[in-house]
Image (cartoon, rainbow, N blue to C red):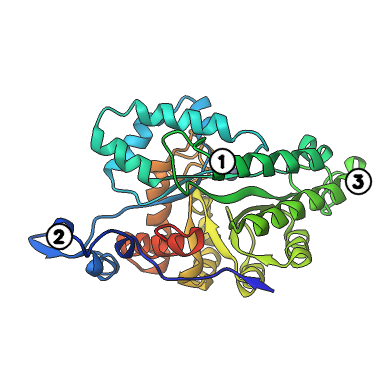
């Protein structure tokens, strides 16, 4: 069994602190912190919140009328540490990078633009749509070609360096695909679709292993299948995004080395289910917890039904922080540390 390498490396260890320590002094509430004091300062809630978003879809969000330059400006001005733009098709990376590049270029403030170039990251992967399942061998080959090109050349426009930091989203969806074992639609059931969907997922897990990338897993109404694909491949490095199962299922993923991410959907929890949700959130080890928007979907309350944006991730942090009895800034610092570990940011 292969586990994610977990190294506690922070941005403060990556910056060139030794050469010019004076330049890295940070005044906070009349006191001065050096970067190597930042983890302590963040955990103590002294530093202003950052609120990273580990899962959003730029093109889909822009299609719903959201001005992405405005959203990006807001993210950068709040000093967000990380925002991960997620792929769903084998060949969508170039269009997503071009859209990100133009949204960033439209930000007028030089300092904000430069912050954005630091905080934006990208994934590439194939969502289990029926067409992709049908053409899985060609599509995975195309995905591999695109990832190789993005990692080896300056195709990332302004986003140079290690900006492609994950594979996904990929996985199983037995809510949408007529292949579910849940008997939602027996007339639509297709054994070929079920097998093909699992093959598409397993091929991408193999590809992630080949590139040494963590995986963004989409798993809906498909816990058993997801676990069995992961076990078949034996690659346990990534996150179960938009987590929608219970404690027993979370334990199974966490025991194998996976992270678990919650979206704005947590804020939809009915009053009667709140204790269950609180138990689940408290069960997740703090070094395995991630948070996200899945923009433009699943806008947190009170924006439910409206287009979501990465900026609204703050409401997810506030909800989860409340359940965990933590200041939101402390939770933000914890999640950022997990992001560094899983995605290798700052190495
Ligand atoms: Zn998504």
Q: Residues within 10 Å of mark 2 (few under 14, many from 20)?
A: some
Can you say whether 3 is above or below 117 in the image? below
Q: Which residue is mark 2?
A: 25
Mark on residue 334? none
**Residue 61 in sight from this viewpoint:** no
Q: CA distance from mark 2 to mark 1?
A: 35 Å
Q: Nearer the viewer, mark 1 or mark 3?
A: 1
For marks 2 and 1, the one nearer the N-term is 2
For marks 1 and 3, the one nearer the N-term is 1
Q: Which residue is mark 1?
A: 150
Residue drawn 55% across and 66% down?
A: 276
Residue drawn 53% across and 54% down?
A: 269
Say whether residue 316 is left or right of residue 227: left
Q: CA distance from mark 1 to mark 3?
A: 33 Å
Q: In the image shown, does 168 or 160 lie closer to the viewer?
A: 160
Q: In the image shown, does 56 or 302 lie closer to the viewer?
A: 56
On-image quarter of the N terminus: bottom right
Quadrant of picture, ligand 1: top right
Can you say whether 50 is above or below 124 in the image? below
Mark on residue 192? 3
């Amino acid at each position: 069994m292969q586990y994610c390498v977990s190294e506690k490396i922070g941005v403060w260890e990556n910056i060139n602190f030794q050469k010019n320590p004076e330049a890295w002094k940070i005044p906070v509430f009349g006191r001065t912190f050096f970067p190597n004091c930042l983890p302590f300062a963040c955990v103590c809630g002294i530093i202003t919140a950052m609120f990273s978003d580990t899962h959003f879809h730029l093109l889909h969000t822009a299609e719903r009328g959201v001005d992405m330059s405005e959203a990006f400006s807001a993210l950068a001005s709040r000093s967000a540490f990380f925002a991960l733009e997620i792929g769903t098709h084998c060949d969508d990376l170039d269009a997503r990078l071009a859209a990100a590049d133009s949204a960033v270029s439209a930000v007028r403030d030089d300092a904000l633009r430069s912050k954005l170039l630091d905080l934006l990251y990208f994934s590439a992967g194939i969502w289990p749509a029926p067409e992709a399942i049908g053409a899985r061998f060609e599509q995975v080959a195309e995905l591999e070609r695109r990832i190789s090109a993005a990692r080896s050349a300056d195709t990332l426009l302004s986003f140079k360096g290690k900006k492609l930091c994950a594979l996904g989203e990929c996985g199983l969806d037995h809510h949408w695909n007529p292949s579910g074992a849940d008997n939602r639609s027996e007339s639509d059931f297709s054994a070929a679709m079920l097998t093909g969907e699992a093959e598409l997922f397993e091929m991408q897990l193999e590809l992630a292993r080949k590139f040494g990338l963590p995986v963004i897993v989409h798993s809906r109404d498909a816990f058993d299948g997801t676990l069995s694909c992961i076990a078949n491949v034996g690659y346990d490095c990534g996150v179960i995004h938009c987590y929608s199962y219970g404690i027993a299922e979370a334990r199974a993923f966490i025991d194998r080395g996976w992270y678990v991410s919650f979206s704005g959907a947590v804020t939809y929890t009915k009053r009667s289910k709140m204790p269950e949700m609180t138990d689940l959130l408290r069960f997740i080890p703090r070094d395995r917890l991630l948070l996200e928007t899945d923009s433009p979907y699943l806008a947190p309350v009170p924006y439910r039904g409206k287009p979501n944006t990465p900026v609204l991730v703050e409401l997810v942090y506030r909800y989860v922080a409340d359940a965990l009895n933590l200041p939101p800034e402390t939770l933000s610092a914890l999640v950022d540390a997990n992001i560094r570990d899983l995605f290798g940011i700052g190495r």
